[in-house]
Image (cartoon, rainbow, N blue to C red):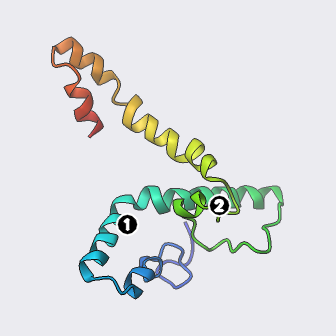
Amino acid sequence: HHYNLSEITDPDLVEQNLADVRASNAPMFVKYLRVAGAMLTWKWFYYAPNTYKELKLAKMRRNGTPIPADVKPEDAVTVQMCMFGQNSFYSFSELMMVVLGPYFLIHFFLVPLPWLAVGDYMGVGNTMYWNAVK
């Protein structure tokens, strides 16, 4: 997906992306909690916004649209940056409506939805649905 794997210019380099955790004066257990939180939310918080940014960049290149001079394409984009308007490629609402929202809705509501009917038919209520959502 890019040619800078495990190099300092690799946008997915964990050591670089969590440098603020290492530099923090917080107690070690707080640092571990931050890393655990990053592990649990990586796909939503970091990977999805960056994949969408790369799609936007590819469309800009394909259409011949120049990348704004103040934008570094190799810089990472996070949900937090989108929430605070620090993203030049798209807004937080666009990220939610186009990327995160549909994924959440489809995978956690629509795909398990048939299990409501199956559970009702088998007389176990919504138990099968909630097991499918987990």
Quadrant housing residue 126: top left
Q: Position of residue 64 (x, y in %)?
A: 83, 60
Question: Is residue 15 in sight in this rendering?
Answer: no
Q: Position of residue 118 (x, y in %)?
A: 25, 18
Circle 1: element type: helix
Residue 38's tag is 1
Residue at x 59%, y 59% (from the top left corner) = 82
Residue 85's tag is 2
Q: Position of residue 33 (x, y in %)?
A: 28, 70
Residue at x 37%, y 37% (from the top left corner) = 108
Disc 1 marks a residue whose amino acid type is Ala
Of tags 2 and 1, the one toward the viewer is 2
Cα gap from disc 2 to disc 1, whole angstroms? 21 Å
Front-most of 88 and 99? Answer: 88
56 relative to 1 in the view: left or right: right
Question: Is residue 23 in sight in this rendering?
Answer: yes
